[in-house]
Image (tube, helix red, strand yellow):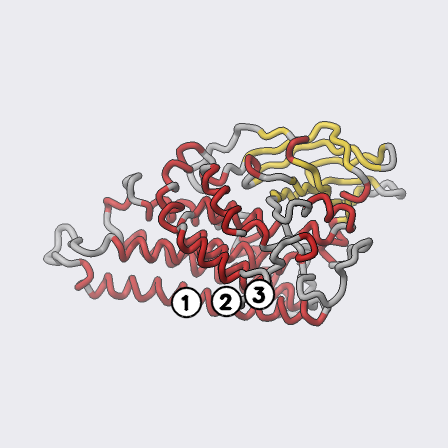
Amino acid sequence: MTTTEGGTATVFDEVAGLAGQFRESGASAEERRWIPEENIDLLEKAGVFRLNVPARFGGIEAPVADQVRILSEISRADTATGWVAMIYVSSSWVPSLFPDEAQKEVYADGSARVSTGFTPTGTLTAEDGGYSLSGSWKWISGARGAGWGLLAALLTGPDGTPVPHAALVPFSELTIADDWHTSAAAGTGSSTVSADGVKVPAHRVISLLDVLAGTTGDRSNTGATGRNYAFIPFFMAQGSAAYLGIARGAYELFLERLPGRGITYTSWTDQSQSPLTQIQVATAANRIAAAEALQETWLRDLQRHADAGTLPSVAERAEARGKAAFAIQLAKEAVEGLFEAAGASVIMRDVPLQRFHRDIQGLALHALFAFNTNQEVHGRSLLGLAPDTPFL
């Protein structure tokens, strides 16, 4: 990990030291359908929510690779805490694409927790020099503990065409439904969020197309700052950090419960002596290692472009989607293999490995990180075809 002026190495050490507490909280987070407030406080004190806050506001403004390693470390300890931390940290970078006035509001405390809903299921209406926002957004991870919501909505243009925009709204002005009842990722508190005529000033609304293209203006932090990443590749990098961390955590949990275990209805009194188990463990370890090695390629490319003040080509963006989703698939397969090798008792609620298995299965269904969708986008690009999606 790079030691930046903001001290990302210190943040990493802090969260690594909290692993035991986070892992211990997993069962209760699942039961209450939301991580303990103590976990958020601990992450706050460790500096996690300062990672994407610009240095001029007192934040760390960490390189994406450092952020990814910290987020993976949190996810290694607990799936829900890791996922929520990933959402807050990745989403707190997006306000840096807004006009300076909006940045001052969001980053005023030097720390930021932002939850996002990028499906444009809301409506913006021009009103009194700003906008009125109404609508509902499903599956807003971390809604109960976020300070700001970053919500996509349609704004009708002069020609009558609805255009997707992104609006920044304080969560105090939003309504959170108690509707997150799931068999996976229950602790993430990904509830439905609603707005009913919420007033949003003009400086807190920007075109989602400009966000995707990296062409937002009215801000002082454009150019080769080293932090102007391509939007979708950045979120693919951040999201994959959670999956790879979960896989690493599941691997460690498997090894922890292995000593003294035999294989029922066989002559193996020590499971570790079984060639089958040895193959299963090696396969999982190598899948995780392969995913992490693949991760390094897109992190390097992301940072290279940000340092140069350039944006990736369409082909590079499609490649980032394909590689990240492939790494996520490898992580999921690693956990599946370990779960199958763990014996029938792994299904008991007091065995954390079963939660890691269920959560990565459920989270892998997330539309942005879905394996087949992203391989199609990448494959089209490799074959010289248009990617057939604006989300690049």
> With respect to residue 108, does 288 lie above or below?
below
Q: Position of residue 56 (x, y in %)?
A: 70, 56
* Badge 2 amino acid: Met
In this rendering, would 16 be left or right of 232? left
Residue 365 shows in this picture? no
The mark lying in front, picked from 1 and 2, is: 2
Residue with the mark numbered 1: 289
The mark lying in front, picked from 1 and 3, is: 3
Q: Position of residue 228 (x, y in %)?
A: 69, 61
Q: Which mark is residue 55?
A: none
- Inter-mark Cα distance, 1 to 3: 26 Å
Residue at image location 55% in from the left, 37% down from the top = 145
Counting residues from the N terminus, which is met first, the one under dot 1 or under dot 2? 2
Element under disc 3? loop
Q: Position of residue 343 (x, y in %)?
A: 23, 50
Residue with the mark numbered 3: 4
- Density class for disc 3 (Cα within 10 Å; few <14, some 14-19, many ≥20) is some
